[in-house]
Amino acid sequence: MEEILLKVQSGLKMFFVDIILLLLAPALFIFGVNQTSSGAVPIAAIGLSVVVFIGWLLVTAGFFILQPNEAAALVMFGDYKGTVKNSGWFWANPFYTKKKISLRSRNLNGERLKVNDEMGNPIEIAAVVVWRVDSAVQALFDVENYIDYVKVQSESALRHLAGMYPYDITDDSHNVSLRGSSNEVSEALRNELQERLGKAGVVVEEARLSHLAYSPEIAAAMLQRQQASAIIAARQKIVEGAVGMVQMALNKLNENGIVDLDEERKAAMVSNLLVVLCGERGAQPVINSGTLHN
């Protein structure tokens, strides 16, 4: 359904009309009663007072108030007439049914879901969604319950998103992961939610992951794998640095002519330096009591 903005009367203007009718109805009734006591027929005055009183009831029923960021969809006998989005005191046809709805931003703190990522690993994931109603007529009439609709579609979109990306990047075939690409994942989640919830007149302002972890049954194994990857990466850096330092030491010894080493002694020196630089424990000094060649 397309939303129609409806212009209604000011409540203050109709308030004066309401007061006039309220004062006129008893005045006519009293006038009719006085006519009865004087012998005249008061049917017209009393009947008119009843009509004015009914009119006062109808005018009073037409008043309604809208708070800031609140809208009202007006329906008469099952036919949608329009929507009022301005805040204030208004008056509309008393036969209109006024269905109010909040346009304020709301938070949806989703529950933790157990799903499989792109690589089939079971993970726990949850998201926080900031949303608001933009089209009152769509939220009220295009879906049964727009709050439940937002909740169910958010859960469905999150499950679909989790299956599109791996939890973490483990090879060169993936550039985006749930853990390492939070901005890209949040934007993809927001776009998918907007596509789903737009049918209910809802605007998704923000969507971000609030919880992400491996499932308990594989968490320990994945932690060991992460630790092993970290150790391997650290060892690679250590070895690269150690090789550079050994090469620099040999070049300095050769340039300054401090000692002339043959290939065998260079190999022994390289081995000793690598042990010292790459070892996890501090090196133990060894005093050579013989000659250089012993």
Image (cartoon, rainbow, N blue to C red):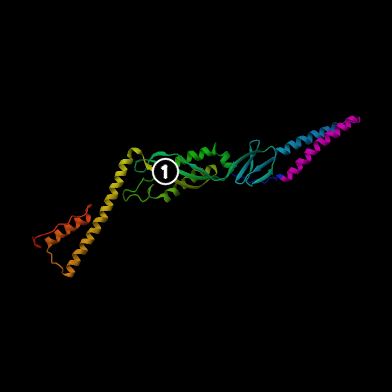
- Residue 268 percent location from the top left of the image: 14, 58
Highlighted magenta segment, given as a residue range: 12-41
Q: What element carries label 1?
A: strand
Quadrant of the snapshot with the N terminus: top right
Q: In which quarter of the image is residue 35?
A: top right
Q: Position of residue 262 (x, y in %)?
A: 11, 64
293 left or right of 114 in image: left
Residue at (27, 56) in percent of width and height = 237
Q: Residue at x 70, y 37 (%)?
A: 61
Q: Residue 252 location, x and y as percent?
A: 20, 67
Image check: 268 left or right of 109? left
Q: Does the magenta stretch include residue 2?
A: no
Where in the figure is residue 200, as x and y percent of width and height?
Answer: 54, 42
Residue 238 drawn above or below residue 10: below
Q: Which residue is drawn at 72% across and 45% down?
A: 12
Q: Is the magenta region chiefly helix, strand or loop?
A: helix
- Residue 270, by quadrant, is bottom left
With respect to residue 170, does 76 lie above or below?
above
* Left or right for 158, reference 44: left
Mark 1 = which residue? 211
